[in-house]
Amino acid sequence: MTLPPHLARISDGRAMASLAMDWLLIAACFAFAIWLAHPAAYLAAMVLIARTQLALAVLMHESAHRTLLRNRRANDAVGQLFAAAPLMLSMFGYRRGHLRHHRAPMAADDPVATVFGIGDYPVPKRELWWRLFKDVTSIGYFLSVRDFAAGKHAHIMPKARKGDRRGLYALASIVAINGLMLGVLAALGHAVLYLTLWLLPALTFLQLFARIRAITEHAGYPAMDDQRLNARTVVRRSWQTFFVGPHRIHHHIEHHQYPQVPFYRLPQVHTLMAERGQLPAANLYRSYPRVLKDVIA
């Protein structure tokens, strides 16, 4: 299906507004926790910050597709500095793996399926709960770091080109942005909040949200030529999509069919595909618990 040209049009204003809102929410969570100084406030801030870290990861994903900003240099710089670097990630490395994922989701050499461990679903209920427990307790994160350090996934991860300095740029941006965050909190007399409200949520709740998102997108499906049939869309926006599917990433069938479409236009693509009967009904869901139930053996 050929899309109307306006659906692939990038709006710098909408993208930057979304990025600004994410950072305003993060700042508000820190301010709320500092003001109230209560365990319940810290817990609420942790959950909301982890959700917004996932939202930043989605905007990094947009940058990887070059659909965040019209200018390519600005797209890459903003995606790295304000979305990837705070999460201690390289958007450039992510781009190499993610574009391979789009060529053949769930294939044996799909880096996304391998890194998130979604290639063996359905799994027993106890195994699913164990995986979610490992994520929310950060055990899963450290096991993943161990596997990467041991080179377990080296055979499928795309390599950077010789002489490519973007890896150094990404490392410098990670140090600079996280150093700036720590410095600002230290100047306010709350340096410890960098650990408790930034790093800890990233190691726990963010891992849980990202796991559920990855399961929802592809788990339980084999590789196939028609990518509409091995992806899922959660059709109804709710508090669930707020936490697990920010920035319209829950429209995942639509995204795989038209990766050139920026995230804020995916609902229009969904409507158009539905009108033309191009959305497989079995792959459309109204909730994340329903997906989790369906990937249990």
Image (cartoon, rainbow, N blue to C red):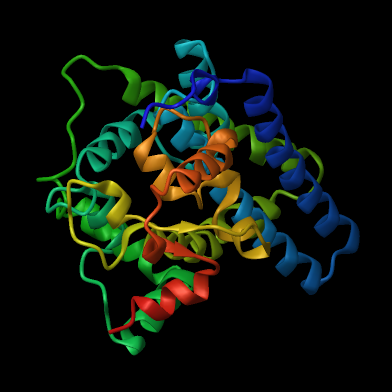
Q: Quick one: quadrant of the N terminus?
A: top left
Give the residue drawn at x 51%, y 69%: 288
From the top left corner, tell me how far across and down residue 285 is, in percent. Answer: 48, 65
Q: Quick one: quadrant of the C terminus?
A: bottom left
Q: Is residue 103 left or right of residue 196?
A: left
- Outermost residue on the right side: it is 35
Q: Is residue 89 left or right of residue 146?
A: right
Q: Is residue 152 left or right of residue 148?
A: left
Frontmost residue, 23 versus 64: 64
Give the residue drawn at x 44%, y 43%: 276
Give the residue drawn at x 89%, y 63%: 36
Give the residue drawn at x 55%, y 67%: 286
Q: Is residue 171 visible?
A: no
Q: Is residue 252 visible?
A: yes
From the top left corner, tell me how far across and down residue 75 is, in percent. Answer: 50, 19
Frontmost residue, 238 versus 185: 238
- The image quarter containing residue 37 is bottom right
From the top left corner, tell me how far across and down residue 256 is, in percent. Answer: 36, 42
